[in-house]
Amino acid sequence: MKYVFGNWKMYLNYEETVSLANTLAGATLPESDLTLAVFPLSIATKPVVDLFANTKFGVGSQNVSWTPKGAYTGAVSALIYSELGCKYALVGHSERRHVFGETDEAVRRKIEACLQNGLTPVVCIGETKAERDSGGREERLIAQIESAFAGLNMNGNEIIVAYEPVWAIGTGDACDVEEAAKVHAFVGAQIEKTIGRSLPILYGGSVNAKNVLSYLSEDNIAGVLVGNASAKADTFVPLIDAASEISK
Ligand code: 13P
């Protein structure tokens, strides 16, 4: 089983989001044991959950607030997404970290909030181009893994990790499969060292219908987190078709 997750970011407005979910819900997809999910615009969560009821698609939030309920202007909590029918939540996406200044500490609190409210966190980590070029990739990944997971009470809950090198996101400059597999081995070993168990690790960054199967063919790449190519039916459906080859 491999994961194919689509992060729709803020590419689509409310109507466009509902329309894409409607198209995907009605699409004929090949038989496969892929685990599929999409992460829609927050305000469209409810209709997307409803449209995907009785389909293969799960739904997740793109972010959560770690605060539960109350006087938190502009926040939407893990509890509220869970009540709406979300199964997953992206936590610490690079755009949250780099555009909105989210800290490692905030990421940790969000993971805890997801676990307390029955959401599977998809914890995003990855180095910038400068960190990669200066040989600081490992150090950055270790810092992100330790701050996210050290001493965390997982209570047997599911957690997914997504390795998304910042330089590969939205650039068309996807990480070579061999390089991604090497980094996944490193990340996997660090996670084992930190929490004493392994977690599924997805790759994200310029994944498309052409390259998806090569990532999924690597044993230590548990799936893909797709941005741009997931936000249109005419690129996402072929990507899922191509990914389905992995279970044949
Ligand atoms: P792209 O697939 O557009 O590079 O985005 C990746 C991503 O950020 C998924 O979360």
Image: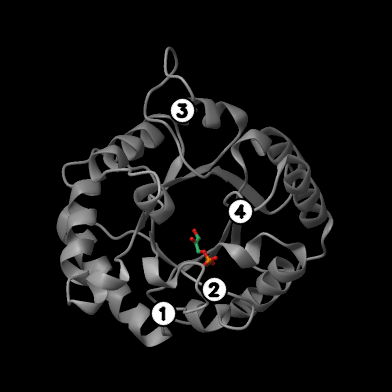
Comes first in the chain, label 3 or label 1: 3
Query: Which residue position is annotated with label 1?
Result: 175
Q: Is residue 204 toward the left or the right of residue 54 in the image?
A: left
The residue lying toward the viewer, choosing from 103 and 6, is 103
Q: Residue at x 77, y 42 (%)?
A: 51
Residue type at mark 3: give it. Ser
Which residue is most to the top? 71
Residue type at mark 4: give it. Trp
Query: Which residue position is annotated with label 2?
Result: 207
Comes first in the chain, label 3 or label 4: 4
Q: Is residue 138 toward the left or the right of residue 13 in the image?
A: left
Marks 3 and 4 sit apart, C-alpha to C-alpha, by: 19 Å
Comes first in the chain, label 2 or label 4: 4
Q: Residues within 10 Å of mark 3 (few under 14, many from 20)?
A: many
Q: Residue at x 57, y 51 (%)?
A: 9
Comes first in the chain, label 3 or label 2: 3
Marks 1 and 4 sit apart, C-alpha to C-alpha, by: 20 Å
Q: The residue tagged with tag 4: helix, strand or loop?
A: loop
Query: Which residue position is annotated with label 3?
Result: 77
Query: Which residue position is annotated with label 4?
Result: 8
| Front disc: 3 or 4 | 4
Marks 2 and 4 sit apart, C-alpha to C-alpha, by: 13 Å
Q: Residues within 10 Å of mark 1 (few under 14, many from 20)?
A: many
Q: The residue tagged with tag 1: helix, strand or loop?
A: loop
Please state the horizontal and vertical placement of residue 231, each as a whole percent of the image: 67, 59
Residue type at mark 2: give it. Val
The residue lying toward the viewer, choosing from 102 and 162, is 102
Q: Residues within 10 Å of mark 4 (few under 14, many from 20)?
A: many
Q: Is residue 234 toward the left or the right of residue 182 in the image?
A: right
Residue 194 can be seen in this image = yes
